[in-house]
Amino acid sequence: MQITFLGGVGTVTGSMYLVRTNRTNLLLDCGLYQGKRDESYRRNRKLPFDVRRLDAVVLSHAHIDHSGNLPNLVKSGFAGPIYATHATRDLCGAMLPDSGRIHEYDVRYVNKQRAKKGQSPMEPLYTEEDALSSLHNFIGVGYDRPIEVARGLRVTFLDAGHILGSAMVLLESETDHGPVRLLFSGDLGQPDLPVVRDPTPMPEVDALMIESTYGDRQHPPLVSIKDELGAIVNTVAERGGRIIIPAFAVGRTQEIVYHLHELTLEGRIPAAGCCREIPIYVDSPLAVNVTEVFRMHPECYDRETRELIAESTSDDPFGFHRLRYVRSVEESKAINTAPNPLIVISASGMAEAGRVQHHLLHAIEDPRNAVLIVGWQAPYTLGRRIAEREPEVRIFGEPYALRAEVHTLYGYSAHADRQQLLDWAAPRAESVRSAFVVHGDPEPAQALASGLEGLGYRHTVVPAPGDQVNL
């Protein structure tokens, strides 16, 4: 078995690994590389392998940095199966067409600028129609059900506890030198996250590919995050402000909604004497569609979520009475003139595109308001500039004074932190022959590799892009 590390190495984006056996070429993930526009376009368009020789794709989960280049793969001639869990397949049914629409919109904007300079137009990486076509290739598979994807090669999905449907991928191959068991962690979730189950314990394997997004740091406890969220809501509501929360449509939005639902049931928001109620708007058509997928997959819920649903007399955690899902542009615009206090959860998670920019534009210069940052923000993004509290930020090219309060709650990350990764990997330290640290920036990856060596992992490698290893 040979692994070629094509993406998701030296960075936390563009997850892509080619696995070759004597008979099969298998791709683990086919994610979009996300970075500066020109570099991203170039790297995503040119697939770094021969599509005609690829037999199958196995997808760990639906986040775009893992799934987002699948439409381009199919458009380029791939006609084989894409294996994923049932929930991942359904999430991709919402997310990939949305990604295609974004590519079309971005290229229209870029081509207007290129036309002014006399430059030739660009084509989108793929379109909404391309994304819809790629969905025909998906095959849904349940957790813990081994399937033979090719002769002598079996795949089993194990719950990774990251987002709905997320999976570790266990590959078992019969080679000329005997059986080999490789585990790709995918993105591992934190224990005790709302909604989804905890990650499955690490099975007995020969080799491990482990993510390292937070390989050098630890998260605050989730309980304190919920308490802090409640305190922020009440403080802003008491002074008659609004809270704007840029949040990813998959996972993060549902986790925040879940905690707001719990705080409401517990009578902790709004504070006594503050106001009768605080309307909560989820303003993202994709988040609305994704939340419908969440409702379709109770088999992925943890025990606490099932009990909350069973005990609630009138609400489900994704649709309680004060929560309002917004689809139309007209409804979205109306939020900006609605009376305070209120909460708006809107994409994108790094405030780089989408409706959240309009809500920020209307709220950011009023000191009564607050912006709540609930996830890691990439350099050069609007979300990063707000998180760093720059005195002035640009929205749609225009400068705005940042007078609203800014709060950061990074504990909402759906990724396990350093200690959680090490605790998960520790029981297999003596039996794993090789560990490959992937999906992390250089410093977190090296830090996690050192941690694994401290546990007793004998052969630990941080691969570079293009590296190949034989198991």
Image (cartoon, helix red, strand yellow):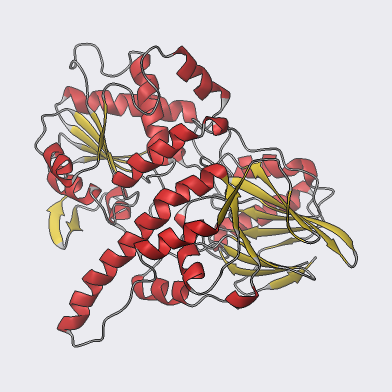
Residue 212, x across and y down, in percent: 59, 53
Identity of the residue furthest to the right in this view: 177
Q: Is residue 292 left or right of residue 117?
A: right
Q: In this rendering, is residue 429 above or below 78? A: above
Residue 89, x across and y down, in percent: 52, 48
Q: Is residue 313 left or right of residue 102?
A: right
Total number of numbered labels?
Answer: 0
- Residue 32 visible in the shown view: no
Q: In this rendering, is residue 321 above or below 150? A: above
- Residue situated in front as seen by the camera: 219 or 60: 60
- Residue 25 visible in the shown view: yes
- Seen at 55% across and 61% down, the residue is 15
- Residue situated in front as seen by the camera: 292 or 461: 292
Q: Which image quadrant is residue 118 in?
A: bottom left
- Seen at 36% across and 42% down, the residue is 289
Q: Which image quadrant is residue 192 in?
A: top right
Q: Is residue 332 left or right of residue 37?
A: left
Residue 458, x across and y down, in percent: 81, 56
Q: In this rendering, is residue 274 above or below 447? A: above
- Seen at 51% across and 69% down, the residue is 73
Quarter occupied by the N terminus: bottom right
Quarter occupied by the C terminus: bottom right
Identity of the residue furthest to the bottom in this view: 118
Residue 93, x across and y down, in percent: 44, 50
- Residue situated in front as seen by the camera: 377 or 279: 279
